[in-house]
Amino acid sequence: MNEDKFDHHTTTVDGLDWHWVEAGSGPAVVLLHGIPESWRCWQHQIPVLSKQFRVIVPDMKGYGRSGKPEGSYAASDVAGETLAFLDSIGVDDFHIAGHDWGVVVADNIINIAPDRVERYVRCCLSLHTYDTRNSLHHQWNGLNPEKAGALMKNADSYVRVWFDTSCKPETKPDEAEIAEIVKEFSYPGISDVVPLYFSHIRNSKPVDYAKFTMPVLYIHGEHDPRQPIDYARGMEEHIPGLEAVLVLDSGHFVTWERPDDVSNAMNWFFHSMLAPGLPIFERSRHYGLPTRPTVEREAWGANPGVAVKLN
């Protein structure tokens, strides 16, 4: 996709440089990427969402063209810095979506400022169920940040290892898209600081998921090798606002592998129109996962004088 189609911006907030792509106008939607990515994680979703919303897609601290300072990369600290960035560009209330490590930061943003988040799309990260044996790189990167950085320095190889081992083969991004991802992970300094996300995670403040009362959509890749479908079961017991679990025929990188499904689901969800009977929920129903809120909502029917029995 031609980069000239996107509007790029930069600013500095409290000494931290930020680069972001922005499109559209209206209610704000903030999109946060994970590893080994950049703002391009969401490049297929931006054109769809920007028809209705002000879409703000930063390179996260340490990534892409944003700053790569020394210091803390604990998720709660990065979340606070991200909120300061949003304050600086005039964003108060917003919808938010995160993928992979972007979820970790988004969770912490909600923990800090739950009243500012209107709706949340949480993509491809465990919550209440997690087995280290499915994600051995988490511990290894955390214990060996210098060695992890040496691997990340060869961006072409590192990105390809991630996508080769994390995508469903039939839905893996094509060579041109992989080249775009590699380019954005090749900026000097990335390999020095991105490993700190792993080694500093235990310095982060605990997240209180009882605060997640806003509508939440969880998106799960059915063939994600590090995220078994069991990771999605029972999530509604921990997130009060969970409205649906959307399972897609995809590996881990759902925004690339199933771009239209993700774009449509997000757009419909932010319009509060993601009804459980839509065909997009076929795989969710197959696994017996919730496709509508499990917490009873206030009655708001067309005939308020008539009692309606809920199934």
Image (cartoon, rainbow, N blue to C red):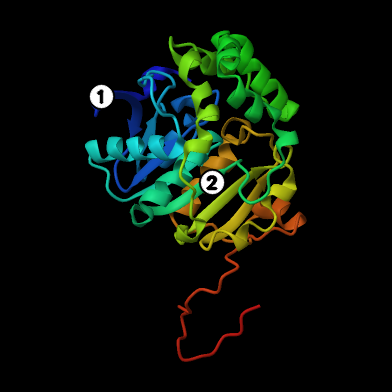
Point 65% across, 61% down: residue: 290
Q: List x then y, in percent, for residue 214.
A: 44, 59
Q: List x then y, in percent, for residue 268.
A: 49, 52
Placement of the C terminus among the 4 image quadrants: bottom right
Q: Is residue 16 left or right of residue 199?
A: left
Q: List x then y, in percent, for residue 217.
A: 54, 52
Point 27% across, 43% down: residue: 91
Q: Nearer the viewer, residue 17 or 70?
A: 70
Could you classify mark 1 by the number of other residues whose Cα lies within 10 Å: few (under 14), some (14-19), or many (20 or more)?
few
Q: Is residue 88 left or right of residue 66?
A: left
Could you tell me how far apart the alpha carbons at marks 2 and 1 are, in whole angstroms?
29 Å
The residue at which mark 1 appears reads as: 15
Q: Is residue 58 left or right of residue 191?
A: left
Q: Nearer the viewer, residue 244 or 279?
A: 244
Point 53% across, 22% down: residue: 195
* Residue 89 visible somewhere in the drawing: no
